[in-house]
Amino acid sequence: MKITTDDIQNLIKFGRGARVDIDLLSSFKQRDYINRQEWRSWEKAVSGLSDLELILVYKGLIGIEMELKWIGGSAAGAIWVYRVISQRRLDNDYHLADFGLQNSDNPYVPFGSYYSGERNIQGYFLHQKERARRRATKLEEDKNFRDRAQKRRVKRSVAIAELRKLSYIERGLIRTKFLDEYRFATVQERLERMASDEKYPPEYYPMEWIKLGDDQIEELPVDLVKKLYDKLSTKTKGEWRRFCQKLQKIEE
């Protein structure tokens, strides 16, 4: 089933404002399939129309889709016809796009992308601007995450190299030293010391320092959580790994 010449002419009539013509409206009741034709069919069907006729077909499709509750979604005829309108540069000021937004309840008309916000061109552009802002923010966050991950890998490699230079007894002495130096320190002070240490990996520090309840972890400053996660998220094991997973939940 194809779009006929009569369909196009009737859409033009409807686009001129012939919605009160019951016979014209009735002629489309059994022809809702034309609203689900692919873009090539519509390009062919409207290729010989004048600019005015093309615009009237667009308006007619929007009106009939509303009146007869046609199903079209992201493949609705008005979307493909609007694309031809754009190719002919007939809507540089977006007044026809605004017509589609204000007169259609199809959230894909006229641009073909889903939009459920305020149904006017100003609302649409604000929505697109916010989407672009969120996308840029997400890209920046992803880049920062990758950069931090790379820095973690480098620092961890250096720290492991240092660790291998010391014996088990020497590492134990260092942990004992930390325990003695920070026996009167707060939880946050101890963790700040560990997070800011670019020389020693976590295994040098007393495991008692990370035996914290979820409430205690949630009370830590966000910057400290990030620094700790950066330090612990590469190749840690056991209690250190479990503590790192708790930090990750907080950071996310």
Image: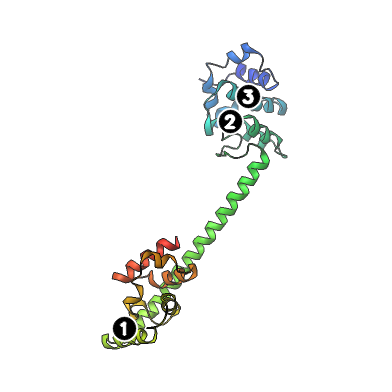
- The answer to whether residue 151 is above or below residue 48 is below
> Can I make out residue 168 in this image?
yes
Q: Nearer the viewer, residue 178 or 127?
A: 178
- Tell me the element at label 1: helix
- The answer to whether residue 122 is above or below residue 211 is above
- Whether residue 192 sits left or right of residue 104 in the image: it is left
Q: Quadrant of residue 90?
A: top right
Q: Nearer the viewer, residue 185 or 92?
A: 185
Q: Earlier in the sequence, mark 3 or mark 2?
A: 3
Image point (35%, 67%), residue name:
213
Instruction: Kindly identify the amino acid type of the residue bearing the numbered disc 1.
Output: Arg
Instruction: Kindly identify the amino acid type of the residue bearing the numbered disc 3.
Output: Gly
Colour scheme in use:
rainbow
Q: Earlier in the sequence, mark 1 or mark 2?
A: 2
User: Where residue 80 appears, x then y in whole percent?
Assistant: 59, 32
Image point (60%, 50%), residue name:
130
- The answer to whether residue 194 is above or below residue 147 is below
Q: Residues within 10 Å of mark 2 (few under 14, many from 20)?
A: some
- Whether residue 145 sits left or right of residue 201 in the image: it is right
Q: Could you tell me how far apart the alpha carbons at marks 1 and 2 are, in whole angstroms? A: 68 Å
- Tell me the element at label 3: helix
Q: Which mark is residue 105?
A: 2
Instruction: Kindly identify the amino acid type of the residue bearing the numbered disc 2.
Output: Asp
Q: Which mark is residue 63?
A: 3
Q: Which residue is mark 1?
A: 164
Q: Could you tell me how far apart the alpha carbons at marks 3 and 1 are, in whole angstroms? A: 76 Å
- The answer to whether residue 140 is above or below residue 72 is below
User: Where residue 102 appears, x then y in whole percent?
Assistant: 65, 32
Image point (57%, 17%), residue name:
28
